[in-house]
Image (cartoon, coloured by chain):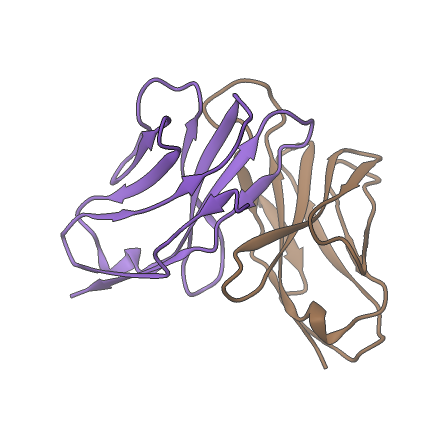
Amino acid sequence: NAGVTQTPKFQVLKTGQSMTLQCAQDMNHEYMSWYRQDPGMGLRLIHYSVGAGITDQGEVPNGYNVSRSTTEDFPLRLLSAAPSQTSVYFCASSYSGLAGPRVGTQYFGPGTRLTVL
Amino acid sequence: AQKITQTQPGMFVQEKEAVTLDCTYDTSDPSYGLFWYKQPSSGEMIFLIYQGSYDQQNATEGRYSLNFQKARKSANLVISASQLGDSAMYFCAMREDSGSARQLTFGSGTQLTVLP
């Protein structure tokens, strides 16, 4: 049981390049999310998904796209990288049940550190 | 308005002593959950403890306990018998249950340093 995995761990892009950050989970969680973490600002929600085929925007969605074709995978696409997207990106998944001691507890991947030059 | 406020950017504690990290929250949703996560220097986010808004008792997980004061809208994390390995950034987060999404809103974090 690998939990939540993310690739790559590090990436350097030039302004205007595009790329996809990969995220996969093997816990059969329906809920998956992408966050970015900037210094002094905690984590901010980019996009999320409540199940395969369903996605929605979070707090800071501009410049990013997502899709959810399977329960396991939730890739994040940067369409045209900008220096303002330099950040650490976390993918998370959570239990979808309605009851239990850890309803909504999100389990995080190890993060991707992205630098845009 | 900030939904999660952590007013202590940095805290120091002596090894083996207890420390309290503050967290206040703002919501009008009657059903919500409060979480604490630890982020060591290696960068991963580690779930520590959870408190539901309807839970009657304060949550505990080993050396971690959550001091939940609903009327004051506070959810402070108490770490007993601090260890050097507790040095990390700590984030308080909230999940509001009014929508279908189970997403978290995070505070800005508290950097805890445990001194030998």
* x, y percent for residue B109: 43, 55
Q: Quadrant of the C terminus of chain B?
A: bottom left
The one nearer the camera, A4 or A113, is A113
Tell me which corner region of the image, top left, top right, bottom left or bottom right, holds residue A13.
Answer: bottom right
Q: Is residue A70 left or right of residue B116?
A: right
Name the residue located 78 percent from the left edge and 40 percent from the top edge.
A56
Place residue B84 in its image quadrant: bottom left
In the image as oriented, which residue stretches furthest toward the front?
B1
Colour that chain A carries in the picture: brown
Q: Could you tell me if residue A75 is visible in this image?
A: yes
- A53 lies above or below A109: above
Picture mark count: 0
Q: Quadrant of the N terminus of chain B?
A: top right
Q: Residue at x 52, y 32 (%)?
A: B27
- Looking at the image, residue A32 sits to the left or right of residue B9; the answer is right
Give the x, y percent position of residue A46.
Answer: 70, 51
Q: Which shade is chain B?
A: purple
Q: Position of residue B5 (x, y in %)?
A: 44, 48
User: In this orientation, which residue lies closer to the viewer: B11 or B36?
Assistant: B11
Q: Residue at x 22, y 55 (%)?
A: B83
Q: Residue at x 49, y 42 (%)?
A: B93
Q: Is residue A10 visible?
A: no
Q: Is residue A51 left or right of residue B80?
A: right
Residue A22 occupies quadrant: bottom right
Measured from the top left, where is residue A95 in percent x and y?
59, 30
Q: Nearer the viewer, residue A60 or A24?
A: A60
